[in-house]
Amino acid sequence: MHDRLDEALLTADEAAAILRVRTGTIYRWVGQGRIPCVRLGRRMTRFRRSDLDLFIQSHTALGGGEYAMGNSGSIMASRAVDGPEKDALDATS
């Protein structure tokens, strides 16, 4: 328990850099409940690196292009997508 309390908190910009998405995508995912965050007031949102690592792990493509099961238990996508195509898919989610 203390490990999570002692863990450094990251800004949305830092989280976006780690996940290689835009900061707006991070905030959209927070609003959708897709990524955990720590709220330190109305306008201050922070992220634990361990939560980002779990998010990456749960969205990692398996052999054949299928994704690992997400937290909801459903397959996240049928193939791996990256770059502008990924951003376009994120915008529709």
Image: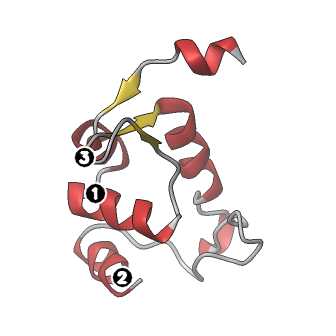
Q: Is residue 5 left or right of residue 27?
A: right
Name the amino acid, label 3. Arg
Q: Identify the mark nearer the N-term, 2 or 1.
A: 1
Residue drawn where x is 22% and y is 42% of the image: 13
Q: Which residue is mark 3?
A: 43
Spatial CA span between label 3 and label 1: 20 Å
Element under disc 1 = loop
The kind of residue tagged 1 is Val
At label 2, which amino acid type do we have?
A: Leu
Q: Which dot, 3 or 2, sits closer to the camera?
A: 3
* Marker count (numbered): 3
- Is disc 3 placed on a helix, strand or loop? loop
User: Horizontally, is 23 left or right of 57 in the view?
Assistant: left
Give the residue at mark 1.
21
Are circles 2 and 1 on residues that touch, CB within 8 Å? no
Please tell me which residue is depicted at 27% across the width and 36% down the height of the picture.
14
Q: Is residue 69 above or below residue 56?
A: below
Relative image position of residue 65 (x, y in whole percent):
59, 73
Front residue (pair 36, 68): 36
Q: Which residue is mark 2?
A: 89
Toward which corner of the image does residue 10 lie, by quadrant?
top left
Q: State the colouring used for the structure image.
A: secondary structure
Classify mark 2: helix, strand or loop.
helix
State the separation of the CA atoms marked 3 and 2: 27 Å
Q: Earlier in the sequence, mark 3 or mark 1?
A: 1
As drawn, 57 above or below 71:
above
Picture residue at 31% right of the left edge, 59% below the top? 27
Horizontal side of 26 relative to 32 (left or right) equals left
